[in-house]
Image (cartoon, grey):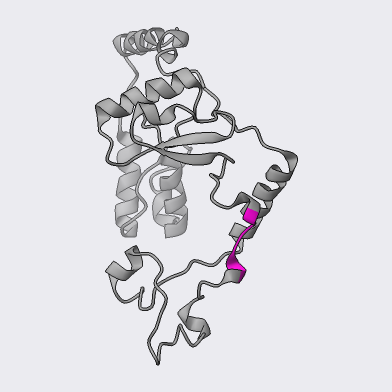
């Protein structure tokens, strides 16, 4: 008896294990085991009858394809109109100051508290200046991290501005939006403001054309 590739079953005995594994890989079969197992696996594959797909299975596949022919119908539900975020009206000097501040920020080290790597609670807290007499960080040991110094300061003209260039104004009531300049100022809703009042602030900000920096997404 011959194999599908024209190889007789008796020829398997004369083949090396590497050659048998190549045949198994071509057939998509496992290549692990001894030589006798490999030969038996090839014989089972050769003796197995060829299964043809029935007409019913082909019809089911065609029906599935027909269901997804009109892709535009179901894609419309997921396409949302992109709304560009509001930008401030800035002078050329202010734009240059913001660009310089962004470039300076890339070279600023991360200021860590003393022993931040040892205690998890210290790694989550902000900066604290070391005061210990023998403190290695205070004594400028390089392996203890950088100290906050005035030399790490950024451009004074862009100090306190949002990365977009807006001046942030803390808002707790819709009435706090009155008197704001929509071209240069943006609102930031306080963290303690409830959901109902927050929606009123968002609605009032939309009426006045004021950008809300921490607007929550609708769920």
**Residue 153 within the segment the image draws in magenta:** yes
Quadrant for the C terminus in the image: top left
Quadrant hosting residue 153: bottom right
Q: Is residue 155 above or below residue 52?
A: below
- The percent position of residue 157, horizontal first and vertical second, equals 65, 51
- The percent position of residue 85, horizontal first and vertical second, equals 54, 29
Instruction: State the residue in front, 155 or 145.
Output: 155
- The percent position of residue 169, horizontal first and vertical second, equals 46, 39
Query: Which residue occupies 39% across, 83% down?
Result: 131
Query: Which residue occupies 29% across, 73% down?
Result: 119
Query: Which residue occupies 34% across, 52% down?
Result: 38
| Whether residue 218 can be seen here | no
Quadrant hosting residue 176: top left
Instruction: State the residue in front, 124 or 34.
Output: 124
Residue closest to the far bottom: 134
Quadrant hosting residue 71: top left
Quadrant for the N terminus in the image: top left
Q: Is residue 32 above or below residue 92?
A: below
Query: Which residue occupies 44% across, 15% down?
Result: 75
Q: Is residue 210 above or below residue 42?
A: above
Instruction: State the residue in front, 21 or 183.
Output: 183
**Magenta residues, start to end:** 151-156
| Whether residue 12 can be seen here | yes
Instruction: State the residue in front, 77 or 2.
Output: 77
Residue closest to the far front: 179
- The percent position of residue 13, horizontal first and vertical second, equals 39, 55
**Residue 75 within the segment the image draws in magenta:** no
Q: Is residue 149 left or right of residue 41?
A: right
């Amino acid at each position: 008896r011959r194999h599908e590739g024209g190889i007789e079953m008796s020829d398997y005995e004369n083949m090396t294990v590497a050659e048998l594994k190549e045949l198994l890989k071509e057939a998509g079969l496992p290549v692990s085991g001894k030589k006798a197992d490999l030969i038996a696996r090839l014989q089972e594959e050769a003796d197995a009858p060829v299964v043809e797909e029935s007409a019913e299975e082909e019809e089911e596949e065609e029906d599935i394809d027909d269901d997804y022919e009109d892709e535009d119908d179901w894609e419309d539900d997921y396409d949302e109109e992109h709304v560009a975020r509001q930008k401030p009206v800035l002078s050329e000097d202010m734009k240059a100051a913001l660009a310089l501040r962004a470039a300076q920020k890339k070279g600023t080290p991360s200021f860590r508290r003393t022993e931040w790597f040892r205690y998890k609670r210290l790694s989550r807290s902000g900066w604290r200046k070391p005061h210990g007499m023998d403190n290695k960080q205070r004594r400028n040991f390089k392996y203890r991290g950088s100290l906050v110094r005035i030399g790490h300061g950024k451009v004074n003209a862009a100090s306190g501005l949002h990365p977009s260039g807006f001046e942030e104004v803390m808002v707790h009531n819709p009435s706090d939006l009155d008197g704001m300049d929509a071209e240069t100022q943006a609102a930031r809703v306080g963290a303690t403001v409830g959901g109902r009042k927050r929606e009123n602030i968002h609605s009032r900000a939309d009426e006045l054309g004021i950008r809300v920096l921490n607007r929550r997404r609708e769920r």
